[in-house]
Image: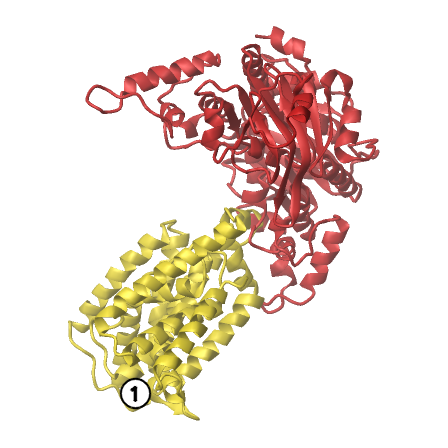
Chain colours: A yellow, B red
Amino acid sequence: MRPEAPALLFLAVLGAAFTLTSDRFLSATNLESILVSVAVLGTIALAVNQVILCGEIDISTGSMMGLCAVAAGAVAVSYGGLILPLLAGVGVGALAGAVNGFLVTVGRIPSIIVTLGMLYALRGVILLVTGGTWITGIPESARVLGTGSTFGIGYPVILLFVLFLIMELVSRHSTWGRNVFAVGGNRRAARFAGLPIDRVRFLAFVLVGVFVGVASVVYLGRAGSVQTNTGTGLELQAVAAVVIGGTSISGGRGSSLAALTGAVLIGVILNGLVLLGVPGIWQQAVLGALILLAVATDVLRRRLVGDKA
Amino acid sequence: MSLSGDPGAQRAATVGEEPAVFRLRNVTKHFGGVTAVEEVGFDLRPGEVHALVGENGAGKSTLMKMVHGLYRPDEGMLEVGGEVVEFSSPRDAETAGIAMIPQELDLFPELSVTENLFVGRPRPRTGWGGLDRNAMRAEARRRLSSLGVDLDVTTTVKRLSAANQQIVAIARALVGEAQAVVMDEPTASLTERETQQLFGIISDLTSGGVGVVYISHRLEEVFAISDRITVLRDGHHITTAPTSELDAEELVRLMVGRPLHELFTRSASSPGEVTLEVRGLSRAGEFEDVDLVVRRGEIVGLSGLVGAGRSELAQSIFGIHSPEAGEIRIDGDGVRIRSPQAAMEQGIFYVPEERRSQGLILPFSIKNNITLSILDRISRFGFVPRGERQTADRFARELSIRGAKVSDPVNRLSGGNQQKVVLAKSLAREPQILLLDEPTRGIDVGAKSEIYRLIDDLAKEGKAILLISSELEEVLSMSDRIVVMREGRVTGEFARGEASQEQVMTAATGGKDRQASNGSREETSRDE
């Protein structure tokens, strides 16, 4: 069975249920707005997925996106245009990801500790750089990735799908993509097979930085301003999307489609709850239950196939 | 006793049978569509060592797991002391006096010896209701000394040698007056001397009336220690006979179901130039001042006890842990090898001894495992080409990997075929120097024979082969030259035909222990 199959099935059942209970759910505009709402999360989840696949974790993406948005926003305010802010966001993200990757591979520190530290450190950097003030007055040119659309489909959605297709291709057919699975599946055996396990993991962390940088410009466009708490909580949502989608939290098994499915599932649930008039205070509880369900499914699957590895 | 069926027939079946500690009658066990064991009978008498042999997948472990309450038979029944019983858990089996020491020890490495003995069992309490640690330690000491060993019961288990861990597992299994003990491959990680120690413990047990089921791939051990032998093949009961009525050749024939003229294949060889040369190689605490030379087309056997530093040496040559002193030369040129990638660039490949934890990516397909180490070579612009499948197919064919398609998970293969995948992975890289670490450990006779033929072919092609092996027969039969290590140092070197088992053992043990592996049972018991 494919790793994302339970999540896809669940998505279909949930979609059918919301379609029956709300006549607004299954409309082109509603579906598009769901996808726009999860574009930032989905983009980050696609990269975090690779980190989790190779047996590591990254919980620094919330603050990282905040910092990327600060960089992109400041550049946008000073210079305008789209390319320069995008380069600033991606550059800062790649640098932060490289620091994560360096500490994990060369420093031999567990990734949960490294990225937890970075989660706080980067938030601290945001406060130091901005002095606690918001960045506002982002020019329209820099907001295109968040606000633009073509044929009625928002750029965030198009971007998400393009990145998804690229990641599917890379994950399935590239050497690095294959090595990510090998390192996550059995790091010792990967080492004995002569795979560059440090380079494989380092690149995964840098990829997260790059994707977070791209996502920050989408965010910038949608929000139009950057606050000091931008991105808070996103780090765990990204991990949740990956796990809910069906990628194994212990690495070695999963897919890009799983990460995408998980992100969309989160979007559909939040949207459906709103349409059904469920009070917003239920959102967290429902998401939490979903994560537990996803992990339980993974554990159950392992028991069924007798996989002790 | 169950009254179902004809009582007269039941009595007829019981009359004339030897008393048994336990008896399996016509048991069958299916897993999904696969029949693991079919209508097998097996009995264990008090005070006997009953060897259970067969190739991997013959059903030995499945059969014994039914005795130990891990599986329930689909058909047939289990009797203990003449009564039909149904176990629903290993705890039931242990209550009934049947203990099992599994192949992979289920000890808690971070806990002390004492704690390990009491895990899951009632512990002595003080008057205040707290744990009575003194009483626990005293009980632990008493139990270990009854096995004739003297261990510090407060050490954590991970610091013990493999043999002592085995003894702790036995001590744990024996708690509560076991009448039957099942040992699954107990000597797999033991040295020759430790094996003899285990045999001593077994004979103490049997002289006290305990029955022992001994599962092993090592036939010389089976002949040395068992009273009766039961052979399983493909889940069927082939025979049960007194050990004295069987010889090794006959036993192998019964196990593999075809005559096996020669297990080992070694053609006449004419080694060429020196290709791998190691001078004064040292790594603190692992090996010291090692000199070693391997020529093209030569098989050099590296013998020694477990822990002699052989694997560590090979791994250093392969760049896993860099040596601290000394030099490595390839074809006369000094090289620095700081990573496995660098070693592979020099044409060196190391095949690790732990198949599942070091050799294979278990969630991967057979194909992805075979091509693991050549992806960087065959890929174009960072992408894996379609030709990958043909490469995998070719190696699967050349090494006759059987039992699954190359696109199936590698998990689906038997141990022997998994080992062929590990070898295929290294051969795909076309190494000139192969470091093989226990390449036939824990695999069945048929696969062993195929792997020996393969190693012989590789030597004929001119590859230099370092064969690390704890099986003396294997080293003696396959090697052109034998190098022996003890406690990190080279202690002996013998040319082909020059070495006897005794000489190699003396070099490996320092002469203190000359007990060779083919010692008979009488010798074993006299030794105590």
Would you say B163 lies left or right of B392 here?
left
Q: Quadrant of the C terminus of chain B?
A: top right
Answer above or below: position of A64 versus B441: below
- Residue A172 appears in the figure: yes
B13 or B480, which lies in front? B13
Q: Callout 1 environment at 10 Å: few (<14), some (14 to 19), or many (20+)?
A: some
- Please state the horizontal and vertical placement of residue B258, each as a whole percent of the image: 82, 35
Residue at image coords 30%, 83%: A222
- Please state the horizontal and vertical placement of residue A130, each as a whole percent of the image: 19, 73
Corner quadrant of residue B391: bottom right
Corner quadrant of residue B114: top left
B77 or B142, which lies in front? B77
- Please state the horizontal and vertical placement of residue B107, each as a whole percent of the image: 44, 31
Q: Quadrant of the N terminus of chain B?
A: top right
Mark 1: secondary structure: loop
Answer above or below: position of A179 versus B79: below
Q: List the single residue furthest toward the top.
A: B526
Residue, disc 1 = A80
Answer above or below: position of B413 versus B295: below
- Please state the horizontal and vertical placement of residue B348, each as a whole percent of the image: 64, 45
Residue at image coords 23%, 81%: A225
